[in-house]
Amino acid sequence: MRNFLSYFFEQLETKIYKFNGNGNGKHAALEMPTYGLRFESTSVLTDVSANLPEEKPLNKAINQARHYLLSNQNPSDGHWVGILEADTTLTSEYIMLMHFLGKVDHEKQRKAANLLLERQLPDGGWNIYHGGPSEISASVKAYFALKLAGYSAEEPCMVKAKNCVLAKGGIMNTNCFTKIYLAMFGQVNWQAVPAVPAEMILFPPGFYFSIYEMSYWSRCIVVPLSIAIAKKPHVPVGDDLLNELYLVPRDKVVYRLKREQSVWWSWHNFIIDADSIFRRYEQHPIKFIRRIALRRAEEWMLEHTNKSGGLGAIWPAIVNSIFAMKCLDYPDNHPALVSQLEEIEKLVVYEGDKLYLQPCVSPVWDTAWAIIALHESGVPGAHASLQKAGKWLLGKEVRTFGDWALKCKVDEPSGWYFQYANEFYPDTDDSAAVLMALQRVSLPEDAHKEKAFLRGLRWIQSMQCDDGGWGAFDRNNNKTILNHIPFADFNALLDPSTSDVTARCLEFLGRVGFSKTYVNIRKAIEFLQKEQEKDGSWFGRWGANYIYGTWSVLSGLAAVGEDMNKPYIKKAAEWLVRVQNSDGGWGETIKSYEDPSFKAIGKSTPSQTAWALLGLFAAGEIQSGAVEKGIHFLISKQKEDGSWDETEFTATGFPKVFYLKYHMYRNYFPLMALGRYCNLTQKA
């Protein structure tokens, strides 16, 4: 059987594709190199079972980290997956969901309440990331969940919570989705809920306010929620459970959203006025249009649960689909409802006498980076563990057209998603990471890998946006006016091009032979140059924050052959050196998303230290004092079992609203940094 290199050379030498990107949705041909698939062999082992000589602390650290990672591989199919931790809002919503369904598992409720009590802050509230301040919506949800679980307002923990909520503006200061959930339980009036008309589903693709102009996660959340809002359920738990959280008596609350008074017309005012019209329409909808809209929304919801780990394979969409199905009078044994409830239970994490919920799971992402880290550390591509993981990743390729195909035209679907199953929604970030991992793995059945690799390559190219960058799940998902919609206060209605995702795609394309001589690579570089901050850093949309963004961009630029001595790149490297902590590590608090003056300020963490080091390596900084101190930090903080500890949240769901902690980040990224350092210093 032909090996991967010979096959790829044959493909590249016999076909030159032209990749246009002119925004007309046609990508009939792709620009591809006609020579040279570049592989960067990082193997330092001559035998797959050999360890590095341990007379050096670096070698010992690599051996231990590698052993730890390999020992945590799933033995049956070869994938990796770590816990994906979020804040307490999901645990609160889990209790709310049980009461919505009228089926309370009291043991699970008790464990969920224990988690909420453990996470309560000294001021009585709950935060949305480790070390962060109390946040109003998370605090109100936790308070309500505890009330549902049987805690009275007079208990000390509840008194503290109430005082915290009132100090932060009271229940009416919560975000839109919190108000919607509370309205279902009668705790706020439905007038407090912005319009989410089910009729949106009838807008055709391409229409300015179509659901397909929203991000994938937004449409998966909003479509089922529009059904629930149209039905306006009322769960009888007592309508006065949260009256003490109102600053103004509930019957005195003014519900009209505030217009900008300084100007006669603005998009904000236009959307507010439209919301008022839709709210009045909600009181007396045109019945036959509403019936059509609800039927279409239901069909869309059910269709998008196929081949997926629940609707969108994310917690809020799955929960909202359950709300919608019950509002549509689905019986408890309806297969669609049962499947969504099963997916909910798969997200529960038990921790002693407590439980909490993951927002989703991350096996594809974790497996790709685990392969890359192990290969960087010297594990050959023919190692059985990498082969097993590579086969598992190949089996996760998307082979059907999803929502993305409305704006991205390719002959064959491809891409990889984040979770175990999410067929409608592959993303460019995961796909680039997977393809970089597969590039490192030697598989016996090369032909299957080769075809999947080429499909994935073409798909990533076709997903490039008109501005030169890449978004995560869609092309040109960037109509910023939509951010003014009242229900979009979760700060992530759209999925525009971002620096970190663009850089990941560039890094992959550079590894397969693309360089800055290609027009679309130059467009991507120009996009990144425009996105650079004045101090030299880049914003991190999906990881915290400027350290993550800067590492990603430097790696991408180096891979496509950008001159790493250019002033703008040197400025970025100098910024990384300048923000190093005195202990040799790097850290950045989530607070930098709200206040950029906190960028790269925070307790040193293994993952962020690894990102900074990898960024410096890409910029050509290998044997500098900053690098040596960073390597020493990672070695000194490693535990005996080869792992690292990290309590901080270092990843992002929605900036300013929802943050994440990947439990595997603290292990595979440090191994990747140590392995690459070992390889680079050996070559020097």
Image (cartoon, rainbow, N blue to C red):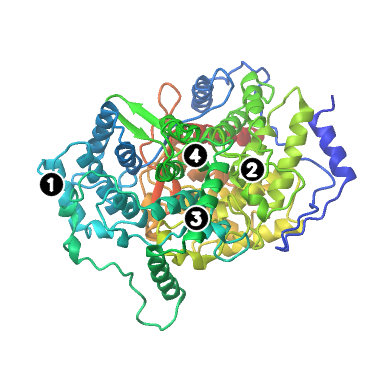
Tag 3 residue = 291
**Left or right of residue 111: residue 361:** right
Establish if 585 lies above or below 188: above
Q: Earlier in the sequence, mark 1 or mark 2?
A: 1
Tag 4 residue = 628
Q: Earlier in the sequence, mark 2 or mark 3?
A: 3
Element type at mark 1 = helix
- Three-letter amino acid code at disc 3? Arg
Tag 1 residue = 159
Q: 334 and 178: which one is in front?
A: 334
Given contact means CB atoms under 8 Å apart, are the residues at marks 4 and 1 in contact? Answer: no
Extreme residue toward the right, this view: 14
Tag 2 residue = 432
Residue at 59% from the left image edge and 34% from the top image edge = 368
Q: Which of marks 3 and 1 is nearer the N terminus?
A: 1
- Three-letter amino acid code at disc 2? Ala
- Three-letter amino acid code at disc 4? Glu
Q: 558 and 539: which one is in front?
A: 539
**Left or right of residue 625: residue 398:** right
Given contact means CB atoms under 8 Å apart, are the residues at marks 2 and 4 in contact? Answer: no
State whether residue 636 appears in this view. yes
Which x, y percent locates residue 120?
A: 23, 41
Given contact means CB atoms under 8 Å apart, are the residues at marks 2 and 3 in contact? Answer: no
Given contact means CB atoms under 8 Å apart, are the residues at marks 4 and 3 in contact? Answer: no
Mark 2–mark 4 Cα distance, whole angstroms, equals: 30 Å
Q: 284 and 601: which one is in front?
A: 284
State the mark number for residue 224.
Answer: none
